Amino acid sequence: MPLTPLDIHNKEFSRKIRGFDEDEVNEFLDQVVKDYEMVIREKKNLEEKVDKLEEKLGHFTNIEETLNRSILVAQETAEEVKGNATKESKLIIKEAEKNADRIINEALSKSRRIAMDVEELKKQAKVFRTRLKMIVEAQLDMIETEDWDDLFEAEISDEDELLKNNA
């Protein structure tokens, strides 16, 4: 189950001696919540956009089917009618084919744009994931540095000297 902004906002970390600065952690979590909410809003907007475009595509598909049926009816009528009626039916068919081609081309163009938008969203998600991973790895590197060991050893040595001086 994915995290919600509320999950991130309510996350509590255990406290340890010489732990992280609580204000910094809270500040960072607040920024993560804002960014996460923004991504969710953008995703919702894009999903609504995709739904609208799919609805339009469905509409154009219906128009295409209607035009194809119209072409068949026009062809049947053309077979029944002789002379001038035959010429007129051919003009109607040509016009209907042009409209069908135009509608198909528009639908294909919109479909390609949607596919490009989806690919762009995938790229953005990968970049976000990579950046987040780099931040987390940098934080882990900071935790694992030898400076912490030096700090702890220095404190122990200072306490030993105080004990010797007091004795």
Image (cartoon, grey):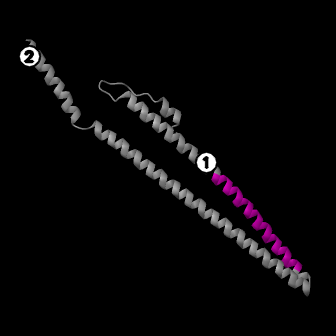
Secondary structure of the residue carrying tag 2 is: helix
15 sits to left or right of 88: left
Q: Amino acid at mark 1?
A: Asn
Q: Quadrant of residue 156?
A: top left
Q: Is residue 15 above or below residue 51?
A: above
Q: Residues within 10 Å of mark 2 (few under 14, many from 20)?
A: few
Frontmost residue, 25 versus 82: 25
Q: Which mark is residue 164?
A: 2
Q: Is residue 56 above or below residue 74?
A: above
Q: Quadrant of residue 78?
A: bottom right
Q: Earlier in the sequence, mark 1 or mark 2?
A: 1
Q: Quadrant of residue 58?
A: bottom right
Q: Position of residue 141 (x, y in %)?
A: 29, 41
Frontmost residue, 19 versus 64: 19
Highlighted magenta segment, given as a residue range? 49-77
Q: Amino acid at mark 2?
A: Lys
Mark 1 — residue?
A: 45
Q: Position of residue 64 (x, y in %)?
A: 75, 67
Q: Is residue 21 above or below residue 35?
A: above
